Image (spheres, rainbow, N blue to C red):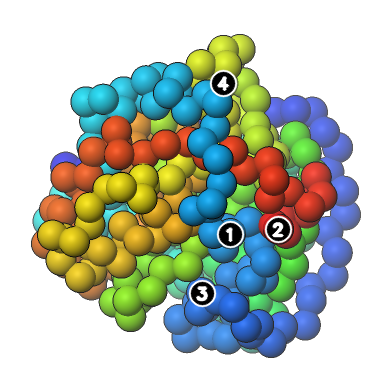
Amino acid sequence: MKASATTTRASSGVTHAATPPAPKAPPVKAGTSDVIAGTHCQIFPADNYWHADIRGLPVNAHSAQWLAAMGAGTRKLHPDFGPSDGAQPVPYGIPITVVPAGHPRVTVAFDYDDESDHLGYPLGADTAIEGGPNADGDRHAIVVTADTCELFETFDTHSAATGWTAGSGAHWSLSSDALRPNGWTSADAAGLPILPGLLRWDEVATGHVDHAIRFTTNLTDASHLWPARHDASSHHDPTLPPMGARFRLKASFDISHYNAQTQVVLRAMQTYGLVLADNGSPWYFQGSADTGWPDALISQLKTIPASAFEAVDTSSLEVSANSGAAR
Protein backbone atom coordinates (compact mmCIF):
# COMPACT_ATOMS: atom_id res chain seq x y z
CA MET A 1 0.00 0.00 0.00
CA LYS A 2 1.29 3.44 -0.85
CA ALA A 3 1.57 6.15 1.77
CA SER A 4 0.48 9.68 0.91
CA ALA A 5 2.93 12.53 1.36
CA THR A 6 1.87 14.66 4.33
CA THR A 7 2.06 18.37 3.64
CA THR A 8 3.29 20.83 6.29
CA ARG A 9 3.10 24.56 5.73
CA ALA A 10 3.89 27.71 7.64
CA SER A 11 2.29 31.06 6.88
CA SER A 12 4.53 34.02 6.14
CA GLY A 13 1.92 36.66 6.90
CA VAL A 14 2.35 38.26 3.46
CA THR A 15 -0.64 40.26 2.21
CA HIS A 16 -2.05 38.88 -1.04
CA ALA A 17 -2.02 40.90 -4.22
CA ALA A 18 -4.67 41.17 -6.87
CA THR A 19 -4.61 38.43 -9.50
CA PRO A 20 -4.14 39.62 -13.10
CA PRO A 21 -6.89 38.98 -15.64
CA ALA A 22 -7.00 35.63 -17.41
CA PRO A 23 -4.67 35.45 -20.41
CA LYS A 24 -5.61 34.46 -23.89
CA ALA A 25 -4.71 30.91 -24.85
CA PRO A 26 -1.07 30.79 -25.98
CA PRO A 27 0.25 28.93 -28.99
CA VAL A 28 2.37 25.85 -28.39
CA LYS A 29 6.03 26.84 -28.52
CA ALA A 30 8.83 24.82 -30.03
CA GLY A 31 11.30 23.00 -27.84
CA THR A 32 9.02 20.88 -25.66
CA SER A 33 6.39 18.21 -26.21
CA ASP A 34 5.00 18.76 -22.71
CA VAL A 35 1.37 19.48 -23.58
CA ILE A 36 -1.70 18.49 -21.55
CA ALA A 37 -3.66 15.75 -23.30
CA GLY A 38 -6.86 17.00 -24.87
CA THR A 39 -5.65 20.61 -25.02
CA HIS A 40 -3.11 22.77 -26.82
CA CYS A 41 -1.79 23.92 -23.43
CA GLN A 42 1.95 23.62 -23.05
CA ILE A 43 3.03 23.16 -19.44
CA PHE A 44 5.02 26.40 -19.12
CA PRO A 45 7.36 27.80 -21.77
CA ALA A 46 10.22 25.77 -23.23
CA ASP A 47 12.73 27.96 -21.36
CA ASN A 48 11.13 27.21 -17.97
CA TYR A 49 13.09 25.76 -15.06
CA TRP A 50 11.10 22.51 -15.17
CA HIS A 51 12.36 21.86 -18.72
CA ALA A 52 16.00 22.76 -18.02
CA ASP A 53 18.58 20.13 -18.98
CA ILE A 54 20.78 19.65 -15.90
CA ARG A 55 23.23 17.05 -17.23
CA GLY A 56 26.07 19.58 -17.39
CA LEU A 57 25.53 21.21 -13.99
CA PRO A 58 28.12 20.73 -11.22
CA VAL A 59 27.40 18.60 -8.19
CA ASN A 60 26.11 20.64 -5.25
CA ALA A 61 28.61 21.05 -2.41
CA HIS A 62 25.98 19.71 0.03
CA SER A 63 25.08 16.68 -2.06
CA ALA A 64 26.58 14.02 0.24
CA GLN A 65 25.02 15.60 3.34
CA TRP A 66 21.59 15.89 1.81
CA LEU A 67 21.66 12.33 0.52
CA ALA A 68 22.67 11.08 3.96
CA ALA A 69 19.86 13.08 5.59
CA MET A 70 17.36 11.41 3.25
CA GLY A 71 18.69 7.92 3.96
CA ALA A 72 19.84 7.42 0.39
CA GLY A 73 22.23 4.65 1.38
CA THR A 74 19.41 2.25 2.22
CA ARG A 75 16.34 3.58 0.42
CA LYS A 76 14.94 3.09 -3.06
CA LEU A 77 12.67 5.32 -5.11
CA HIS A 78 8.96 4.95 -4.51
CA PRO A 79 6.52 5.88 -7.31
CA ASP A 80 3.60 7.43 -5.42
CA PHE A 81 1.16 6.60 -8.21
CA GLY A 82 -0.19 3.59 -10.05
CA PRO A 83 -2.87 0.90 -9.55
CA SER A 84 -4.53 1.02 -6.12
CA ASP A 85 -5.54 -2.67 -6.23
CA GLY A 86 -8.80 -1.89 -4.45
CA ALA A 87 -7.23 0.04 -1.57
CA GLN A 88 -9.02 3.20 -2.75
CA PRO A 89 -11.65 3.84 -5.44
CA VAL A 90 -9.25 5.58 -7.86
CA PRO A 91 -5.63 4.98 -8.90
CA TYR A 92 -2.86 6.35 -6.71
CA GLY A 93 -1.50 9.66 -7.89
CA ILE A 94 -2.69 13.23 -8.37
CA PRO A 95 -5.48 13.64 -10.94
CA ILE A 96 -5.61 16.37 -13.57
CA THR A 97 -8.99 17.85 -14.52
CA VAL A 98 -9.32 19.70 -17.83
CA VAL A 99 -12.35 21.99 -18.07
CA PRO A 100 -13.86 23.54 -21.22
CA ALA A 101 -14.54 27.17 -22.00
CA GLY A 102 -17.32 28.66 -19.91
CA HIS A 103 -16.90 26.33 -16.95
CA PRO A 104 -18.46 27.97 -13.87
CA ARG A 105 -16.03 29.44 -11.35
CA VAL A 106 -16.54 29.47 -7.60
CA THR A 107 -15.17 31.30 -4.59
CA VAL A 108 -12.96 29.19 -2.33
CA ALA A 109 -12.34 29.87 1.38
CA PHE A 110 -8.68 29.18 2.30
CA ASP A 111 -6.95 28.31 5.56
CA TYR A 112 -3.78 30.04 4.31
CA ASP A 113 -5.78 32.97 3.04
CA ASP A 114 -2.96 35.53 2.91
CA GLU A 115 -0.84 33.32 0.63
CA SER A 116 -3.62 32.13 -1.69
CA ASP A 117 -4.73 33.61 -5.00
CA HIS A 118 -8.20 35.12 -4.78
CA LEU A 119 -10.18 34.70 -7.97
CA GLY A 120 -12.82 32.31 -9.27
CA TYR A 121 -11.68 28.68 -9.36
CA PRO A 122 -13.22 26.36 -12.01
CA LEU A 123 -14.21 23.71 -9.46
CA GLY A 124 -17.35 21.63 -9.60
CA ALA A 125 -18.82 18.14 -9.55
CA ASP A 126 -16.36 17.24 -12.33
CA THR A 127 -13.26 18.12 -10.24
CA ALA A 128 -11.14 15.06 -9.50
CA ILE A 129 -9.69 14.96 -5.98
CA GLU A 130 -6.51 13.09 -5.06
CA GLY A 131 -7.53 9.79 -3.48
CA GLY A 132 -11.19 10.13 -4.44
CA PRO A 133 -14.07 12.22 -3.08
CA ASN A 134 -13.90 10.74 0.43
CA ALA A 135 -10.13 10.54 0.76
CA ASP A 136 -8.00 11.59 3.68
CA GLY A 137 -4.53 12.99 3.05
CA ASP A 138 -3.56 15.98 0.91
CA ARG A 139 -6.65 15.99 -1.34
CA HIS A 140 -4.91 17.94 -4.11
CA ALA A 141 -6.94 19.21 -7.04
CA ILE A 142 -5.32 20.32 -10.30
CA VAL A 143 -7.48 22.03 -12.92
CA VAL A 144 -6.47 23.33 -16.35
CA THR A 145 -8.75 25.55 -18.45
CA ALA A 146 -8.62 24.27 -22.04
CA ASP A 147 -9.44 27.64 -23.60
CA THR A 148 -7.17 30.03 -21.66
CA CYS A 149 -4.51 27.54 -20.47
CA GLU A 150 -4.70 28.63 -16.85
CA LEU A 151 -3.60 26.33 -14.04
CA PHE A 152 -5.42 26.18 -10.70
CA GLU A 153 -4.14 24.06 -7.81
CA THR A 154 -5.53 23.51 -4.32
CA PHE A 155 -4.76 21.20 -1.42
CA ASP A 156 -7.08 19.85 1.29
CA THR A 157 -9.88 20.54 -1.17
CA HIS A 158 -13.48 20.08 0.01
CA SER A 159 -16.97 20.87 -1.23
CA ALA A 160 -19.98 21.24 1.04
CA ALA A 161 -23.42 22.81 0.95
CA THR A 162 -21.85 26.00 2.27
CA GLY A 163 -19.29 26.14 -0.54
CA TRP A 164 -15.72 25.16 -1.40
CA THR A 165 -12.81 25.23 1.05
CA ALA A 166 -9.11 24.42 0.73
CA GLY A 167 -5.90 24.73 2.68
CA SER A 168 -4.46 27.01 -0.01
CA GLY A 169 -4.96 27.85 -3.65
CA ALA A 170 -2.68 29.01 -6.44
CA HIS A 171 -3.11 30.17 -10.03
CA TRP A 172 -0.67 30.37 -12.94
CA SER A 173 -0.74 31.17 -16.63
CA LEU A 174 0.83 28.20 -18.40
CA SER A 175 2.30 30.59 -20.99
CA SER A 176 4.26 32.57 -18.39
CA ASP A 177 7.48 32.06 -16.41
CA ALA A 178 6.20 34.28 -13.57
CA LEU A 179 6.67 32.95 -10.03
CA ARG A 180 4.55 33.42 -6.95
CA PRO A 181 5.64 36.15 -4.49
CA ASN A 182 8.62 35.00 -2.48
CA GLY A 183 7.41 33.61 0.85
CA TRP A 184 4.09 32.31 -0.48
CA THR A 185 3.08 28.68 -0.33
CA SER A 186 0.98 26.99 -3.02
CA ALA A 187 -0.67 23.58 -3.08
CA ASP A 188 2.92 22.45 -2.49
CA ALA A 189 5.08 23.47 0.49
CA ALA A 190 7.75 24.79 -1.89
CA GLY A 191 5.35 27.33 -3.41
CA LEU A 192 5.82 25.70 -6.81
CA PRO A 193 3.17 24.37 -9.19
CA ILE A 194 2.57 20.62 -8.93
CA LEU A 195 1.48 19.97 -12.53
CA PRO A 196 4.86 20.46 -14.29
CA GLY A 197 6.52 17.99 -11.90
CA LEU A 198 3.99 15.18 -12.29
CA LEU A 199 5.04 12.16 -14.30
CA ARG A 200 2.16 11.38 -16.67
CA TRP A 201 1.33 8.05 -18.29
CA ASP A 202 0.49 9.64 -21.66
CA GLU A 203 4.01 11.10 -21.99
CA VAL A 204 5.76 7.92 -20.82
CA ALA A 205 3.68 5.89 -23.28
CA THR A 206 4.83 8.12 -26.15
CA GLY A 207 8.46 7.62 -25.12
CA HIS A 208 9.46 11.15 -24.12
CA VAL A 209 9.43 13.04 -20.81
CA ASP A 210 10.97 16.51 -20.99
CA HIS A 211 10.66 17.89 -17.48
CA ALA A 212 11.85 17.38 -13.92
CA ILE A 213 9.78 15.29 -11.52
CA ARG A 214 8.38 16.33 -8.14
CA PHE A 215 9.42 14.37 -5.03
CA THR A 216 9.29 14.55 -1.23
CA THR A 217 11.34 13.85 1.86
CA ASN A 218 10.52 13.92 5.56
CA LEU A 219 13.07 16.38 6.97
CA THR A 220 13.95 19.64 5.22
CA ASP A 221 15.83 22.80 6.07
CA ALA A 222 14.02 26.05 6.82
CA SER A 223 15.15 27.53 3.51
CA HIS A 224 14.36 27.35 -0.18
CA LEU A 225 16.31 27.57 -3.42
CA TRP A 226 15.17 29.38 -6.55
CA PRO A 227 12.63 28.97 -8.02
CA ALA A 228 10.97 27.60 -4.86
CA ARG A 229 9.17 30.37 -2.98
CA HIS A 230 8.43 28.84 0.41
CA ASP A 231 9.69 26.40 3.01
CA ALA A 232 7.95 24.52 5.81
CA SER A 233 10.41 23.47 8.47
CA SER A 234 11.58 24.48 11.92
CA HIS A 235 15.03 22.97 11.31
CA HIS A 236 17.82 25.46 10.58
CA ASP A 237 20.30 22.85 9.45
CA PRO A 238 22.29 23.07 6.18
CA THR A 239 22.81 19.30 6.23
CA LEU A 240 19.09 18.97 5.47
CA PRO A 241 17.92 19.64 1.90
CA PRO A 242 16.01 22.90 1.26
CA MET A 243 12.82 23.15 -0.74
CA GLY A 244 13.66 23.43 -4.41
CA ALA A 245 16.80 21.26 -4.18
CA ARG A 246 17.30 19.37 -7.45
CA PHE A 247 18.73 15.89 -7.80
CA ARG A 248 20.03 14.06 -10.87
CA LEU A 249 20.27 10.34 -11.58
CA LYS A 250 23.97 9.81 -12.21
CA ALA A 251 25.02 9.41 -15.83
CA SER A 252 27.00 6.36 -14.77
CA PHE A 253 23.86 4.52 -13.67
CA ASP A 254 23.24 1.77 -16.23
CA ILE A 255 19.63 1.86 -17.45
CA SER A 256 20.08 -0.58 -20.34
CA HIS A 257 18.63 -3.64 -18.58
CA TYR A 258 15.31 -1.96 -17.71
CA ASN A 259 12.28 -2.18 -19.98
CA ALA A 260 11.66 0.56 -22.55
CA GLN A 261 9.08 2.47 -20.50
CA THR A 262 11.25 2.46 -17.39
CA GLN A 263 14.16 3.75 -19.47
CA VAL A 264 11.99 6.71 -20.57
CA VAL A 265 11.54 7.70 -16.93
CA LEU A 266 15.17 7.09 -15.99
CA ARG A 267 16.43 9.18 -18.93
CA ALA A 268 14.24 12.02 -17.70
CA MET A 269 15.77 11.64 -14.23
CA GLN A 270 19.26 11.84 -15.74
CA THR A 271 18.40 14.80 -17.98
CA TYR A 272 15.94 16.86 -15.90
CA GLY A 273 16.14 15.29 -12.45
CA LEU A 274 13.95 15.43 -9.36
CA VAL A 275 12.81 18.60 -7.56
CA LEU A 276 12.17 18.58 -3.81
CA ALA A 277 8.73 20.15 -3.53
CA ASP A 278 7.06 19.02 -0.30
CA ASN A 279 7.47 17.31 3.05
CA GLY A 280 6.47 13.66 3.00
CA SER A 281 7.90 10.18 2.75
CA PRO A 282 11.56 10.15 1.62
CA TRP A 283 12.18 9.50 -2.08
CA TYR A 284 8.48 9.29 -3.00
CA PHE A 285 8.01 10.83 -6.45
CA GLN A 286 4.66 11.79 -7.86
CA GLY A 287 2.71 11.01 -10.99
CA SER A 288 -0.77 11.45 -12.37
CA ALA A 289 -3.69 9.29 -11.27
CA ASP A 290 -4.24 7.14 -14.35
CA THR A 291 -5.62 3.64 -14.92
CA GLY A 292 -2.99 3.08 -17.64
CA TRP A 293 0.08 2.77 -15.41
CA PRO A 294 1.54 -0.73 -15.97
CA ASP A 295 2.44 -2.84 -12.93
CA ALA A 296 5.76 -3.78 -14.54
CA LEU A 297 6.83 -0.14 -14.82
CA ILE A 298 5.85 0.63 -11.22
CA SER A 299 7.69 -2.46 -9.98
CA GLN A 300 10.90 -1.60 -11.81
CA LEU A 301 10.87 2.01 -10.60
CA LYS A 302 10.72 0.72 -7.02
CA THR A 303 14.12 -0.94 -7.51
CA ILE A 304 16.08 2.25 -8.30
CA PRO A 305 18.48 3.03 -5.43
CA ALA A 306 18.37 6.53 -4.02
CA SER A 307 22.16 6.33 -3.75
CA ALA A 308 22.31 6.57 -7.56
CA PHE A 309 21.37 10.27 -7.32
CA GLU A 310 23.38 13.42 -6.65
CA ALA A 311 22.29 16.95 -5.85
CA VAL A 312 23.19 19.55 -8.46
CA ASP A 313 24.00 23.24 -8.20
CA THR A 314 21.27 25.03 -10.17
CA SER A 315 22.40 28.59 -9.40
CA SER A 316 23.72 29.11 -12.93
CA LEU A 317 20.24 28.54 -14.37
CA GLU A 318 18.70 31.57 -12.68
CA VAL A 319 17.99 34.53 -14.95
CA SER A 320 15.92 36.53 -12.47
CA ALA A 321 14.86 35.90 -8.88
CA ASN A 322 11.21 36.43 -9.78
CA SER A 323 11.11 34.41 -12.99
CA GLY A 324 11.07 30.68 -13.66
CA ALA A 325 12.95 31.18 -16.93
CA ALA A 326 16.23 29.25 -16.98
CA ARG A 327 19.44 29.65 -18.94
Mark 4: amino acid: Asp
Residue 261 appears in the rendering = yes
Q: Which residue is at the front of the view, 88 or 203?
A: 203
- Left or right: residue 34 compared with residue 171: left
Q: Tell me what residue is drawn at x 42 percent, y 23 percent.
A: 64
Mark earlier in primary sequence (1, 2): 1
Q: Which mark is residue 221?
A: 4
* Mark 1 vs mark 3: in front: 1
Secondary structure beneath label 2: loop
Q: Which residue is mark 1?
A: 52
Q: Which residue is mark 3?
A: 34
Quadrant location of residue 70?
A: top left
Secondary structure beneath label 4: loop
Secondary structure beneath label 3: loop
C-alpha gap between disc 2 and disc 3: 18 Å
- Left or right: residue 48 compared with residue 246: right
Mark earlier in primary sequence (2, 3): 3
Q: Which residue is mark 2?
A: 327
Callout 1 touching callout 2 (CB < 8 Å): yes
Mark earlier in primary sequence (3, 4): 3
